[in-house]
Amino acid sequence: MAKRRVIIMGAAGRDFHNFNVYFRENKEYEVVAFTAAQIPNIEGRLYPPELAGPMYPKGISIHPEAEISDLVRRKNVDHVIFSYSDISHQELMEKGSLAMSAGANFGFLSPDQTSLQSKVPVIAVCAVRTGCGKSQTSRKVATLLQQMGKRGVAIRHPMPYGDLRKQIVQRFASYADLDQHNCTIEEREEYEPYLDRGHIVYAGIDYEKILREAEKEADVIIWDGGNNDFPFIKPNQLITVVDPLRAGHELRYFPGMINFVSADVIVINKSVEASYEQLQTIQNNIKKYNPDAQVIRGRSVVTLETEEDLRGKKVLAIEDGPSITHGEMSFGAGTVAAQQHGAELVDPRPYAIGSIKEAFYKYPQIGNCLPALGYYPEQLKDLEKSINATPCDVVLVASPIDIRRVIKIKRPAIRVNYELEEDGHPTLEEILKKD
């Protein structure tokens, strides 16, 4: 019987994992292409033979997602498998309709089909959208485990934006490791906060190999999800973070709703900033779709690294890039810090340069703040130029990393920190000690 021909629609993460665990050695299928979206400059590459395996001695080409209809027809494709995250159900089915109208079936692989089994306990931290507070929740879990005398090792959702052959298994224990692997700002944002607290992080492309390496030095694996994707590793406990400032999104975005319905613990972050109506929407949806979940109310506590009087000063807020781009937020912790300290936010849009300027056109919901984007060296230069071109008294750096390490900011710059604190009971500590 002829092999069924497959295209995997992705964004350099879930797509590669789905291929590795389901298609790589599956003789019933032939993956004829990947497509790429969301992240700039990840198409036009090759999924290399070293990763693709013996069935694919020439590797697999990666194309822009915009070519999907043509690729289906030209390559006589039977199935298109959607394999990335943080996309509205509406947009998801628009893409499915394009694939089906070109003649292919359109579908997904479930958590059971793609989750690896660990030899040690796994706590997974996921979210319903990008920017809910997943990373700060993961960091708190790692710290609590450390205080309990357990070795927690984080495995982070993939961000393979460089040479794929060099990113099969990555281990980060120091800043030197970040430099060695030529990490982008987006990668550093996820890894550095763990390193600051003395934790080890694994990431890469082949998560079977990554998991087996992490197990050697872990009492507990912490799966730190990306966007709103579900875990690559079967969890003993799934913690899902929701954002009441985007109440209702927990039911409207793929695959975040899977995390919402499957969660053992739901953390309602930013609950202090949310309105009564927003919190009620979240609570009603929990009652309807996951009434057995334990619910934690949390808040993202924003602080400055130094005591500074910002009253009346003009400040530029630099925010976490993914959260305010495809996460569709209009502001972040930098904006909150500026408002709390009586500062005046400067609009950076008239001064944005190159790819940063393009980001404002692509994501018009962004407010008076600058997304910390640095997926490739040229974009990092655009970011530096955009910051230094914006007239202000102070720059508030609210990216999860200290970007002063990788770019030169000509004006006084203060780092903004934000950590999860729980209100009431249960707390994460109580839940972890109980389980």
Image: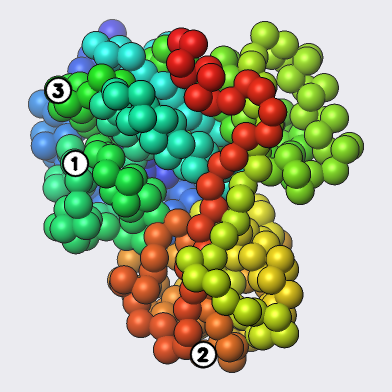
> What label sits on residue 171 in the rendered view?
1
> What label sits on residue 389 in the rendered view?
2
- Amino acid type shown at disc 1: Arg
The quarter of the rendered structure image containing the N terminus is top left
Q: Residue at x 27, y 14 (%)?
A: 120
User: Spatial distance from mark 2 to mark 3, Cα to Cα?
Assistant: 48 Å
Residue 230 is situated, as x and y percent measured from the top left of the image, at: 48, 26
Tell me the element at label 3. loop
Using the image as rendered, state which of residue 171 and residue 165 is in the foreground: 171
State how the image is colored.
rainbow
Q: Residue at x 50, y 24 (%)?
A: 429
Say which quarter of the image contains residue 271: top right
Residue 284 is situated, as x and y percent measured from the top left of the image, at: 82, 22
Residue 262 visible to the viewer? yes
- Amino acid type shown at disc 3: Lys
| Drawn side of residue 303 relative to residue 161, left or right | right
Q: Which residue is mark 3?
A: 216
Tell me the element at label 2. helix
| Earlier-in-chain disc, 1 versus 3 | 1
Disc 2 and disc 1 in contact, CB within 8 angstroms = no
